[in-house]
Amino acid sequence: MMTEVESAHETHGSFVSKATGHPLPPPDHGTPVIALFNSFRQPQNLQPVPAIPPKLGKWDQSAPAQVHTNVFTEVLRKDQQDVTKILETPSQDVANNVPNSAALTNTNLVPYVILHLAALSGDWDIARNFLQSKPQAVRAKITKGSETALHIAAGAKRTIFVEELVKWMTSNDLELKNDVGNTALHFAAVSGIKRIAEVMVDKNPTLPQIRGIKDLTPLHMATLLGHREIVWYLYDKTILMDRDHMGLLISAITADLYDVALDIIQKNPQIAFARDENGETPLHVMARKPLACYSGSQLGFWQRCKGSLLPHTKAPYGKKLMYMQATQLVKQLWEKILTLNSDSAISDLIRTPSSLLFTAAELGNIDFLIILLRSYPGLIWHVDEQNRSIFHTAVIHRQEKVFNLIYELGGLKELIVSYKDNNNNNMLHLAAKLAPVIRLNDDTGAALKLRRELLWFKEVEKIVQPLYKEMRNSIGKTPQILFTEEHKELLREGEVWMKGTASSCMVVATLIATVMFAAFSTVPGGNNNDTGIPIFLQSRAFIVFAISDAVSLISSAASILSFLSVLMSRYAEGDFLHSLPNRLIVGLATLFISITAMMITFVATVFIVLGSEFHGIKVPIALVAGVPVGFYALLQFPLLADMINHAYISRVSFRPCNHLLH
């Protein structure tokens, strides 16, 4: 059983964990960073009182990323008095108050609970009062992980607290390590706050050289997490050994710190041939980093529009700068590799442990491939272990930009297209296979996914020899038979998706047509009993009413017919290429027009009925009438835009771009 003290301190441990808010490391940055964060251990099994976060005083200001807690300092000081009172209570009394009490896990941590909480919250006033009574606590290990108050404050991004605490410490105190061997500067590197690192290094310039877990320097820790500002600061302060450069370069590339990577390459050009623990060179790592995502060519439709409307915003500039740096890094690495004595040496380097050409082709890293092919055109003839070229790989993984390079080869493309893999599959067989899930998910709905697959099959069919269209692979299947079998389930899902979408939209279109027909039959204001002519015929609002009502009725009728034709289709494979998408586009577009015209009709009716008065009512009603139109556009326009993109824009996806020549 736990004593009351144990129980109370456990509550503080819970508060500490929530208040600190340490950022978790990216999952692909490896064990070193995870182990560093695991070293943020909180004291457990101690509960002086229910935890009350402290108020932030004048000493609590920190970097912008610092998390503040707004609670009154007086409450915390009362909390401290309660803690002290409980800590001074005889253990027998505590045991009597809490049934089934157990022994304290670590009695040495109990006196430092107040300092621990102050370091977490950044309350220097409380910490200063505590240190005045116990000066030795400045270097005490106050957690189960053997962290000092400086470790805790640095990890919690408490800049002002660190500045004041360092004044109480000697340079040797700053070198204290926790259980896993990390100093407070390692914690500062992970936090990413440059000012915290500056305060420590100014006090002890040798701190950047001290290695922590996995023999990593603070510089390496900051690089793993991509904290550019503190990386550049520590980069100038750290004396690196030869074995450090490769690990630092790979970490910089992984974290997109290409400016740092360029500096490392320029100072150590021979590192282009070095390999990491996985046997990969820096160029292998760059092959997995599609440069197009930094240039903006892989942005979505709305993102590209935003970039064109706001060309001078900071984000696009940062992306362009990163793209330029990444491109320059690839060029420098490749130029260095081309200095090797023979083609076989170059081939061995780029093929081991895996071929970086095919990695780049699989991921669609078109800019990377262009850089390599421009200076070494012979790479287009390279094949993998299954006798597939980079163009075959592009077909398998549906990478249009990489595949388009084949159009720039002229007559040579006939030779590459003739390659067959170990299973006697030609390029059309590979196009007939179902695309990887990650590529299928780029499209909305099963019907558009199937259409994308059909586009690929038809495009490859155009460039293969006629004989290859009927060629059988090792299991006796032609490309067309293979396509039908591979896409049987997708065809069924596409039919269900098309019918469901058409049925739902047709119900709405039918309702609109019914309402609009009824509205025109009973015009607002009524008719003249003698002539039968509408009373408000000469009103401008009535003209708007008549036109919008007619437009809504006609467009909704067109929408009904369009969706009806979708429902009555035979749903063959070829129908998904042009016929069905075009019909659905017409139906969605006319439905949107009918909804918009219906709301205009409603507004015109309001103006007719209310006459020339009640302006305070008519204007708000007119504004609110636009809400359904906007809501429909918000929900359905992305689908319509995607279908238009598929039906018309994607037709020019397969075309030569002259990347290799310009």
Image (cartoon, rainbow, N blue to C red):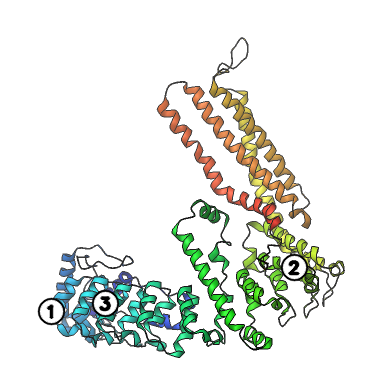
The quadrant of the picture occupied by the N terminus is: bottom left
Residue 128: image quadrant is bottom left
Q: Is residue 359 visible?
A: yes
Quick one: label 1 or label 2, which is nearer the N terminus?
Answer: 1
Q: Secondary structure at mark 2?
A: helix
* Residue position for label 1: 132
Q: Are marks 1 and 3 in contact (CB under 8 Å)?
A: no
Residue 133 relative to residue 485: left or right: left
x then y, percent, for residue 605: 53, 26
Quick one: label 1 or label 3, which is nearer the N terminus?
Answer: 1
Q: Residues within 10 Å of mark 3 (few under 14, many from 20)?
A: some
Q: Secondary structure at mark 3?
A: helix
In the rendered image, the vertical position of residue 342 relative to residue 490, given as above or below: below
- Callout 2 amino acid: Ala
Residue at image coords 52%, 44%: 631
x then y, percent, for residue 287: 59, 76
Residue at image coords 78%, 51%: 570
In the rendered image, the vertical position of residue 88 relative to residue 644, given as above or below: below
- Callout 1 amino acid: Gln
Residue 513 relative to residue 619: left or right: right
- Foreground: 560 or 39? 39
Q: Residues within 10 Å of mark 1 (few under 14, many from 20)?
A: few
Residue 523: image quadrant is top right
Q: How many marks?
A: 3
* Residue position for label 3: 199
